[in-house]
Image (cartoon, rainbow, N blue to C red):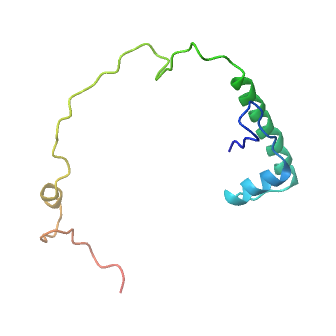
Amino acid sequence: MLIYLNFSSSLMSINKETVKKISKLSRIASNEEFENSMIKDLNSILKFVEQLNELNTSNTEPLSSVVDQKLYQRDDVEKKINEKKDILQNSPIKNENYFVVPKIIE
């Protein structure tokens, strides 16, 4: 969850109230140790994002993959798999459209 103070490169820092709100929304039990750890971790992530935002990417082409390999595209072929009549042939007791199983609740 990135919260921008404004649209510049400055991101706000995470505080204890923010961690408590995130914990409540995600239904994660928190304590003092957890909150302090999360504040440290989330602020380090935001610091890294700020470093990434400083990079000049204006002359960089977008990538869909880092691997220089074409994807093999196969033809879509319809296969008849798990058809009801074939599956019901395995039923020990025949019924029109269902498996018949022994009653387990009396």
Q: Which of 17 and 7 is in front in this view?
A: 7
Residue 19, given in percent of the width and then of the height, sits at 78, 51
Residue at the location (69% across, 18% down)? 55
Q: Is residue 86 left or right of residue 44?
A: left
How many numbered callouts?
Answer: 0
Residue 59, given in percent of the width and then of the height, sits at 57, 12
Q: Quadrant of the N terminus?
A: top right
Q: Which of 92 and 84 is in front in this view?
A: 84
Residue 12 in view (yes/no): yes
Q: Quadrant of the C terminus?
A: bottom left
Residue 29, given in percent of the width and then of the height, sits at 75, 59
Q: In this view, does 93 lie to the left or right of 69?
A: left
When asked about the image quadrant of residue 73, the answer is top left
19 in relation to 66, above or below: below
In the picture as drawn, the residue positioned furthest to the bottom comes out as 106
Residue at the location (34% across, 21% down)? 71
Residue at the location (87% across, 54% down)? 32
Residue 27 in view (yes/no): no
When asked about the image quadrant of residue 40, the answer is top right
Residue 21, given in percent of the width and then of the height, sits at 75, 57
Q: Which of 88 and 70 is in front in this view?
A: 70
Q: Which of 96 and 105 is in front in this view?
A: 96
7 in relation to 102, above or below: above
